[in-house]
Image: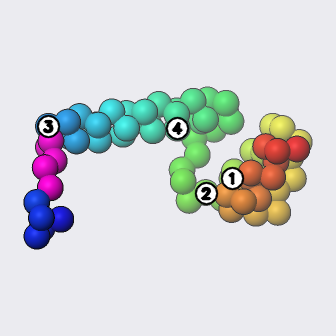
Amino acid sequence: MERVGFYADVDYLEDCRSNVKQYIIERREDLCALAGVPIKATQHELVKTVLYEQFGLTVASTVADELDLLVSD
């Protein structure tokens, strides 16, 4: 890109960044409301506990592939 040149609309990218950040924050709040407890990204054991206690789901791992299997069932 440096050799050829690449146009980037910086104002647009900054708007997109703030919009995506706000979207992620809102979805995180929705998930915490659904779970009934505040959950941070690194609290895997809490996620497992909430899934088991609230929804009766047993999860061997909180890796994305394992969680995707729950959705497909």
**Which three-letter amino acid code belongs to the residue tagged 3?**
Asp
Alpha-carbon span between mark 2 and mark 1 = 5 Å
Residue marked by disc 3: 11
Q: Nearer the viewer, mark 2 or mark 4?
A: 4
> On the rendered structure, is 27 left or right of 51?
left
Residue at 29% from the left image edge and 37% from the top image edge: 16
Could you say where residue 51 lies in the image, as x and y percent from the top left? 78, 45
Q: Nearer the viewer, mark 1 or mark 4?
A: 4
Q: What residue span does the magenta drawing correspond to? A: 6-10
**Which three-letter amino acid code belongs to the residue tagged 4?**
Arg
Residue marked by disc 1: 46
Residue marked by disc 2: 43
**Which three-letter amino acid code belongs to the residue tagged 1?**
Leu
SS class, disc 4: helix
Q: Is residue 37 visible?
A: yes
Alpha-carbon span between mark 1 and mark 4 = 15 Å
Alpha-carbon span between mark 3 and mark 4 = 26 Å
Are the residues tagged 2 and 4 within 8 Å (C-beta)?
no
Residue at 54% from the left image edge and 50% from the top image edge: 40
Residue marked by disc 4: 28
Residue at 52% from the left image edge and 38% from the top image edge: 28
Q: Disc 3 or 4, which lies upstream in sequence?
A: 3
Q: Disc 1 or 4, which lies upstream in sequence?
A: 4
SS class, disc 3: helix
Q: Which mark is residue 66?
A: none
**Which three-letter amino acid code belongs to the residue tagged 2?**
Gln
Alpha-carbon span between mark 1 and mark 3 = 39 Å
Could you say where residue 60 lies in the image, as x and y percent from the top left? 82, 63
Q: Quadrant of the C terminus?
A: top right
